[in-house]
Amino acid sequence: MGARESASSDGTELLSAMKSLFKFAAAAAMLITAQPVAAADTVQRAAAVVNGVVISTYDVDQRVRMVLSTTGGAQNAAAQQRMRESVLRTLIDEILQLKEAERVKLKVTPKEIDEAIERIGKQNGTTRDAILKSLAANNIDPNTLRTQIHAELAWSQIVEGALAPRVRISESDVDNELKRIEAGAQSPQFLASEIFISMDSPQDEARARRTIEQIYQQLQTGTNFMQLAQQFSESATGARGGDLGWVQQDDVPAEVWQMIQRMRLQTVSQPIRTERGYYLIALRDKMRPAGSGDEKPPAPPGRPAGVAAGSVKLKRIVLGVPPGMTKDQEQNYVASAMQLRQAIRGCQGLEDFLKPIRGVVLVDLPVLPIKDLAPEIRQIVQTMNPSDVSMPFFSKEGEQNLMNMLVVCGDRIREDFVPSKAFVMPSREDVKDRMFNQELSVMARRYMRDLRRDAAIEIRDPGVLNTASN
């Protein structure tokens, strides 16, 4: 594949990232309670000035509202404040990208923006007009979306035109990478996703650390990892929702590899510091080659004799839901349940762990065939492994509203490690494309770093930030 063909693929990938980002086109009304725009929202105070271009607090508020509506999780005042610094950084970068497009005489027409919104609509089973009406109905200025798409299109064209021709991936580079991947097939591998926030310089570390911590806190409220990665991750994988695919030891920084090996399935790591920046890792699955002595770990202690394959032992954590909660109170309640979920380490000792917590009941369920579970429970359990804790979910018993989490004990639903025959070597073309896009992403980050370094950026409203900074 030639440089321009690869770059076009990467540009398409950048655009396709917006597919999930704007799913609210069909569902925004369910995600946001439409409210009149407060008078304060219309006050155009300057939040920042970037090379003479003003970013108003209204611009920040609008983008925060759009981000929270499309990523799920908490949308209350605390969540809005938490995301303001990350959003302001994104808006600053977009101004720099658009200014750079002007400098190189690159133009994105209103028609191209409309066509991009139309494509997003088709990908989500709706139309451009429906997307714009949904925004208006939820007090989000359509220009908030148009500005973001304008910057995305302009930047992808700059990257394709200025940087892609400079990427050089030799055939020997591809040969060496294929050999490394093949050798790694005999070692443990992990299916993971990432959110990466880079550090432009040592002086930038405090800002990068705050940003990753703010994203981590928002994830604790049930926000979708993939969509936050699409919004904020500065890695090439951001266009794919942070998907790293199956990773081997040398695919990720040493600090990330050490963390992945200690993680439980279906959990998100705490922020991981590396030389280049900070990571959050979501561990989705893992595998180890056959013959390693660990293809089928022994059944957990206390497993009842004669339990048929396909059966499962569950414990149910039940939390009573106070009546008459507001939407903000309900989101805070879910956030508290998410924190409890993160602290649970499996069935063993669970009863003693929960005893001091008021309002929590632990129900010890019998071993049940998976096929006999209620469909909605079966759907949850089939994605879990031993010691996994499900996401909180609501149920109603009589007049009582309940919040539940399920903990898997006993039989394995699927193996933690699968035989090496499940491993499939990627094609030479796929490896070359991946290497090309990784190198292009590194060059694009350097380009943005230089634009930030040379820019005149003034934060006018420190209230937008947790700590005022560039």
Image: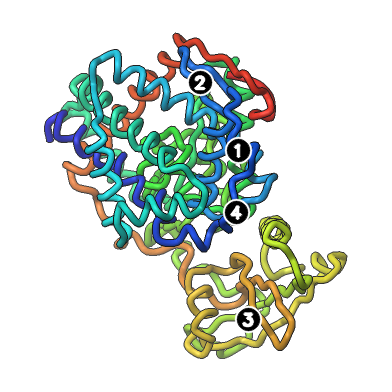
Depth-wise, is mark 2 or mark 4 nearer the camera?
Answer: 4
Crowdedness near tag 1: few (<14), some (14–19) or many (≥20) residues, C-alpha within 10 Å: some
Crowdedness near tag 3: few (<14), some (14–19) or many (≥20) residues, C-alpha within 10 Å: few
Q: Position of residue 338 (x, y in %)?
A: 67, 58
Instruction: Work out whether mark 1 precedes mark 2 in sequence or the reverse, and give the earlier one.
Output: 1
Q: Is residue 383 left or right of residue 43?
A: left
Work out whether residue 186 or residue 317 is closer to the camera in this orientation and state it: 317
Depth-wise, is mark 1 or mark 2 nearer the camera?
Answer: 1
Instruction: Work out whether mark 4 precedes mark 3 in sequence or the reverse, and give the earlier one.
Output: 4
Work out whether residue 172 or residue 468 is closer to the camera in this orientation and state it: 468
Q: Is mark 2 on a helix, strand or loop?
A: strand
Give the residue type at disc 1.
Asp
Q: Quadrant of the C terminus?
A: top right
Q: Give the number of the disc on residue 35.
A: 4
Q: Name the residue at 17% across, 26% down.
A: 170
Give the residue type at disc 4.
Gln
The answer to whether mark 1 and mark 2 are in CB contact below 8 A is no
Distance (Cα) linking label 1 and label 2:
16 Å
Give the residue type at disc 2.
Val
Q: Give the number of the disc on residue 54.
A: 2
- Residue 437 visible, this angle: yes
Q: Which residue is label 3 attached to? A: 303
Instruction: Work out whether mark 2 precedes mark 4 in sequence or the reverse, and give the earlier one.
Output: 4
Q: Is mark 4 on a helix, strand or loop?
A: loop
Q: Which residue is label 1 attached to? A: 41
The answer to whether mark 2 and mark 4 are in CB contact below 8 A is no
Distance (Cα) linking label 1 and label 4:
12 Å
Q: Position of residue 86 (x, y in %)?
A: 55, 33
Instruction: Work out whether mark 3 precedes mark 2 in sequence or the reverse, and give the earlier one.
Output: 2
Q: In which quarter of the image is the N terminus?
A: top left
